[in-house]
Image: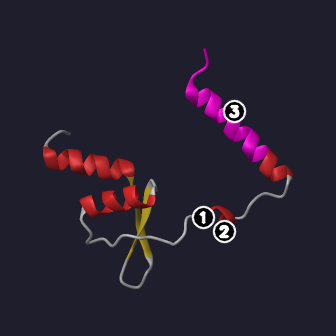
Amino acid sequence: MRSFSESGSKVKQHLISVSFLQGGSTVGDVMSTPPIAARPENKVADAAVMMLKHKVHRIPVVDTKAQLVGIVTRTDIFTALASETGAA
């Protein structure tokens, strides 16, 4: 029996090959809009709410000049929350 990741990998490979053969989509065609971002001073819980609300797994972190300073992921959120609750 094949695992889900093996099946998912084959589907992904197929989609990539089809995309290349047909010229492919642009990033603009597939990006999430409107853009969302967090600031370094935002609370971890606020970033988690943003991810749930916008159904995303990563959020860019920008400074006051809207310059990218990092990316926060779901794993970052889980790790921080586990650390705060003593579960880590």
Which residue extends farthest right?
21
Residues under numbered marks 2 and 1 in contact, where contact means CB atoms less than 8 Å apart? yes
Helix, strand or loop at label 1? It is loop
State which quarter of the image contains the C terminus.
top left
* Residue 74 location (% of width, % of height): 38, 50
Q: Which mark is residue 31?
A: 1
Local crowd at mark 2 within 10 Å, few (<14), some, or many (≥20)? few
Rendered view: 65 above or below 38: below
Helix, strand or loop at label 2? It is helix
Residue, disc 2: 28
Looking at this view, is 67 or 24 the one in front? Answer: 24
Local crowd at mark 3 within 10 Å, few (<14), some, or many (≥20)? few
Q: Which mark is residue 10?
A: 3
Residues under numbered marks 2 and 3 in contact, where contact means CB atoms less than 8 Å apart? no
Is residue 8 highlighted in magenta? Answer: yes
Helix, strand or loop at label 3? It is helix
Nearest-to-viewer mark from 1 and 3: 1
Local crowd at mark 1 within 10 Å, few (<14), some, or many (≥20)? few
Rendered view: 11 above or below 41: above
Q: Considering only order in the chain, which callout, 3 or 2, is on the residue closer to the N terminus?
A: 3
Is residue 46 highlighted in magenta? Answer: no
Q: Which mark is residue 11?
A: none
**Res 49 visible:** yes
* Residue 18 location (% of width, % of height): 81, 46
State which quarter of the image contains the N terminus.
top right
**Res 72 visible:** no
Q: State left or right for residue 53 relative to residue 45.
A: right
* Residue 54 location (% of width, % of height): 44, 61
Segment tinted magenta in the rendering: 1-17
Residue 43 falls in image quadrant: bottom left
- What secondary structure prevails in the magenta region? helix
Residue depicted at 36% across the width and 70% down the height? 38
